[in-house]
Amino acid sequence: MRKKLTAGICSMAMLMTTIGTVTVIAGESAEDKKNMSGEITFSFWGIPEEVAVQEAITEEFNKEYPNIKVNLDHVSGAADFNTTILTRISGGTAPDVFYMGEVMVPIYADKGVVEDLLPYAEQDSLDLSDYWDGVLSPAGYHDGHLWAFAKDCTPYMIYYNKDMFDEAGVAYPDSSWDFEKFKETCIAMTQTDDNGKVTRYGIAPENGWPAWFNIAYKNGGKILDEEGKRMVVDPNTAEALQFYFDLANVEHCATNPDDMTSMGGGEIDAFKSGLASMVIGGRFMTYFLKDFDGNYGFTTFPIEKSEVAPLNFVALGMAKDSNNKEAAWEFIKFYCGKTGQEINSATGMGMPVMKSVTESGVWMLEGETQEQLDVILKQFNNTKDHPFHPEWMKLMDDIFARNMTEAARGKTTALEALENAAEEANAYLEEVGR
């Protein structure tokens, strides 16, 4: 059962300022909010249930801004979302506000199609110190910009089936574990039949860049050079990824991509059906486990040389060519403010981006504990930016993922895959003049 949330709404003194040709109304009074008018389109992706979340936030927003009409545009799938938005932008029909995944922020900024939100925040005296650095920094904050305003975020964590651990007499994992303890736990939680065939894996690990980067960072590894311009072959990254892939291909206590294909489902399906004792994912796992018939907990990735963890997030961006920037900003500010955060985060699909809301625990679901909140806060206070790059889709979604998947399948070593990826990626960057 989800905890009920109480929306708190505050008002500030009036301040009128102009940013270029855009008038920003900072700290509106209740009467100003009531009188502000406009119409905006808000485009988002997500499962059908997320539409209800947008409707709830919009309903609360309209209690303060009754004359601003928000048209909700649900683009059902995330896969083609960016193509859809960029096509609309180029065609002059961009939505005023739209979702941006963390890796897309530098891409949209590089194309010059999103509004810098930092001047708006500054003129409204928005307390950005109440927002986690792990969502501000990747949006350009330390370079004097805010190309997108995160609406929710999550570190990547390891979820475990408490019932299976109890049955096996194995202690629950916690944030003190290192690589060796992680491997021992995966082995201990793996079951085989009389013929040696695995009937339950210790873990169904994610094989994609979020998990790969996390395990590399925990070993002090990096993906790009210090300037963030070229892919590197870092020995710490190679070591961590080889360890990760060996769990499946040497220790046989984890699934590899071929196993998942033959099982006909995803990692979360393996966990829910009892084919794996642990699984990897962000806070969104809590939502997808709402019908899980069992007890589960979560903890951090194993820590070998470093505690840092990146935050994955979804942000709201404003189209540079929007004709409704005042109304669009008020909606973004509300959505990423206290009331919007409490409504959105209580779904279990993400965590708040505001420190005060996160620390309050008001967004947590029934049964979640202070110990789990402490695990989350520890990660929020030790963040590391992903190696964001304007050529991300080619570098990471294509070149890096393609080469590392071969290593995950056991067809090559992690070091060889990194070498191949770096050679191909850097040659591409030279070719396109990046």
Image (cartoon, helix red, strand yellow):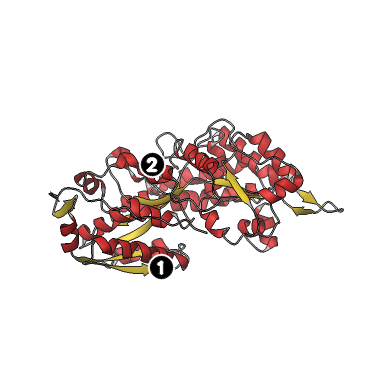
On screen, residue 162 versus residue 88, left or right, reads right
Q: In 3D space, how far apart are the residues under numbered discs 2 and 1 (Cα atoms)?
A: 28 Å
Q: Position of residue 120 (x, y in %)?
A: 22, 49
Q: Position of residue 226 (x, y in %)?
A: 42, 33
Question: Looking at the rendered structure, which numbered label has been put on residue 347?
Answer: none
Which residue is the site of mark 1?
75
**Residue type marked 1:** Val
- Foreground label between 2 and 1: 2
Which residue is the site of mark 2?
132
**In this view of the protein, which residue sits in the foreground, 73 or 345?**
345
Residue at the (49%, 49%) spot, across then down: 396
Pointer 2 with pointer 1, Cβ within 8 A: no
- Say which quarter of the image contains residue 326: bottom left
306 over 364 or under it: above or below: above
Q: Position of residue 352 (x, y in %)?
A: 41, 49
Q: Residue furthest top?
A: 305
- One can see residue 388 in this view: no
Secondary structure, mark 2, is loop
**Residue type marked 2:** Trp
Say which quadrant the C terminus sits in: top left
- One can see residue 412 in this view: yes
